[in-house]
Image (cartoon, grey):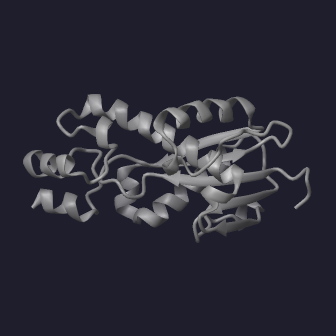
């Protein structure tokens, strides 16, 4: 790939939670404006992620965020919903990338978009554009879960972000699932029984 290539890094956040959307981001970094400190979002403190997310939005050539909601996750399965969110993020980019790098071992459907792509296991730790996408996806999803916390009190969504903590599982058993829970996930199914 040439030095003038517009490489879109793509990553997701929220495959493992029991509630909320799976969120993907696509980022085309500006080689003339490198961002120090990019890394896998899971390895960064929340405050560092927020600071870097702001820098990414200000410095990147282009970025976009998209998601698949819990109904889509239940209908498609989490892998297919993740790939759908990634594809949506790419489609929302304000300019077309010349190539796509995706964290993981699977690519969203790209051929019909005329895009070439490569999946990179642990790419969020090794490719700056994927790291940037990881950070944007994680910070956006965390913010969304804090907003949903106000809509669905009693689940502490703002605290655990929908992950299967002991507190969340106890709330599911006691209250049953909310409209944003993923009913295809076993703990949510058991809570409905």
Q: Position of residue 174 (x, y in %)?
A: 8, 47
Residues 53 and 179: in front is: 53
Residue 107 located left or right of residue 34:
left
Residues 122 and 83: in front is: 122
Would you say residue 147 is visible in this rendering?
Answer: yes
Q: Position of residue 28 (x, y in %)?
A: 74, 45
Residue 50 located left or right of residue 64:
left
Residues 168 and 72: in front is: 168
Vertical comparison of 148 with 126: above or below: above
Residues 15 and 87: in front is: 15
Residue at x-position 31% and y-position 47%: 162
Would you say residue 25 is visible in this rendering?
Answer: no
Q: Quadrant of residue 116?
A: bottom right
Q: Position of residue 13 (x, y in %)?
A: 48, 51
Q: Residue furthest bottom?
A: 105
Q: How many marks?
A: 0
Which quadrant does the C terminus fall into? Answer: bottom left
Q: Position of residue 31 (x, y in %)?
A: 84, 43
Which quadrant does the N terminus fall into? Answer: bottom right
Vertical comparison of 83 with 13: above or below: below
Residue at x-position 10% and y-position 45%: 175
Residue 143 located left or right of residue 29:
left
Residue at x-position 32% and y-position 35%: 158
């Amino acid at each position: 790939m040439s030095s003038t290539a517009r490489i879109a890094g793509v990553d997701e956040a929220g495959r493992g939670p029991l509630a909320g959307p799976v969120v993907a981001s696509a980022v085309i970094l500006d080689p003339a404006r490198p961002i120090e400190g990019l890394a896998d979002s899971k390895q960064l403190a929340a405050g560092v992620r927020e600071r870097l997310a702001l820098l990414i939005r200000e410095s990147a050539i282009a970025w976009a965020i998209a998601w698949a909601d819990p109904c889509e996750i239940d209908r498609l399965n989490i892998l297919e919903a993740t790939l759908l969110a990634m594809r949506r993020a790419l489609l929302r980019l304000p300019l077309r990338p010349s190539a796509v790098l995706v964290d993981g071992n699977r690519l969203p459907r790209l051929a019909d978009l005329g895009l070439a792509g490569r999946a990179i296991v642990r790419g969020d730790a090794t490719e700056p554009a994927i790291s940037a996408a990881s950070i944007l996806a994680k910070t956006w999803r965390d913010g969304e879960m804090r907003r949903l916390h106000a809509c669905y009190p009693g689940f502490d969504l703002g605290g655990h972000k929908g992950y299967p903590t002991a507190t969340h599982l106890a709330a599911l058993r006691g209250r049953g699932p909310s409209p944003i829970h993923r009913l295809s996930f076993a703990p949510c199914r058991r809570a409905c029984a």
